[in-house]
Image (cartoon, rainbow, N blue to C red):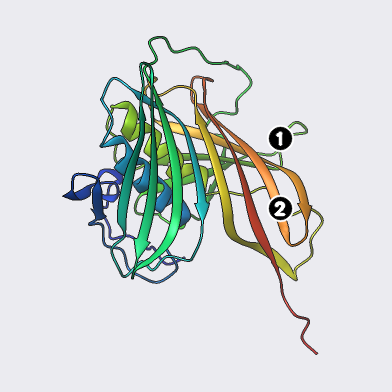
Amino acid sequence: MTDLLAPGSTFAELVDLERVDTNVFRSTFESAGLKALYGGQVAAQALAAAGSTVDDARLPHSLQCRYLRPGDETRPVVFRVDRDLDGRRFSARRVTAWQAGKAILTASASFHAASTVTSSDRDDLPRPTDGVERASRFPALVHTQEPVPTERTPPGRLWVGFHAPVAPDPLARACAQAFVSDLTTPDSPGWDDHVEPGPSLDHVMWFHDLQSPQDRWLVETELEAATSERYTYRGRMWSESGRRVATFAQEALYVEHQHQH
């Protein structure tokens, strides 16, 4: 699998945006430009742009993205932020990502002045070392490992970790979780070799824990429905200690190949 990132690339470089104006940002990260822009990358950058306009005391708690057009990795993305709300406890931002004069993504992000972290825990997670290495679209940036299946294993399960540590601040962790959440999809619902997952349409994410140290996250995905050329799935992210750090849901297209005669 061809890596889209240069060796030594870090997540900090990926979400490092140039401030063009008060509410306008531009991506500076360069990739190999071999495929369409990865949805998790533009979502993470949109959240980084929104967070750059919010007080540091307010942490991201939700992100909703709608993918409008495929992005081009060979061109920069411009992010325009609208400051919808700065209330007593919440801030709300809308972000539009532009390329070549066309919107490729719209996103809304909400930030909360939270004081105490509470999240569900579990003690039945597989160990990251008990699994099989899995090819990643970004081997220079992340390493992925598929746990050994068990009777209770959900349809899609993947340990994901960054080669270089993610910055400890909550915004950076939220952006990293957004990036990771789009790396895996559940098994296809009884599809054969003529059908494969297609482009994402909508992506919604809720952040539960941005304080716990980040090493590797277990990403679990499970199919909810498939109809009218679309499928919907939900996902959960867990820390190595068993803390639930995020929940997400996504709708995407599936592509049916024409039979060859």
The answer to whether one can see residue 111 in this image is: yes
Residue 259: quadrant of the picture:
bottom right
Comparing labels 2 and 1, the label whose residue is closer to the camera: 2
Residue corresponding to mark 1:
153
User: Is 4 left, or right, of 206 in this rendering?
Assistant: left
* Residue at (22% x, 57% y) in the render: 28
Mark 2–mark 1 contact, CB under 8 Å?
A: no
**Who comes first in sequence, dot 2 or dot 1?**
1
Q: Residues within 10 Å of mark 2 (few under 14, many from 20)?
A: many
The answer to whether one can see residue 129 in this image is: no
Label 2 to label 1: alpha-carbon separation: 21 Å
Residue 54: quadrant of the picture:
top left
Please tell me which residue lies in front, 173 or 129: 173
**Which numbered circle lies on residue 231?**
2
User: Is 234 left, or right, of 169 in this rendering?
Assistant: right
Q: Amino acid at mark 2?
A: Tyr
Regarding mark 2 in the picture, which secondary structure is present there?
strand
Looking at the picture, does residue 119 appear above or below residue 246? above
Q: Quadrant of the C terminus?
A: bottom right
Residue 37: quadrant of the picture:
bottom left
* Residue at (31% x, 60% y) in the render: 77
**Which numbered circle lies on residue 67?**
none
User: Is 158 left, or right, of 63 in this rendering?
Assistant: right
* Residue at (55% x, 28% y) in the render: 127
User: Is 121 left, or right, of 23 in this rendering?
Assistant: right
Looking at the picture, does residue 126 appear above or below residue 48? above
Residue 43 location in percent, x, y? 42, 48
Q: Residues within 10 Å of mark 1 (few under 14, many from 20)?
A: few
Looking at the picture, does residue 178 appear above or below residue 135? above
* Residue at (34% x, 47% y) in the render: 45
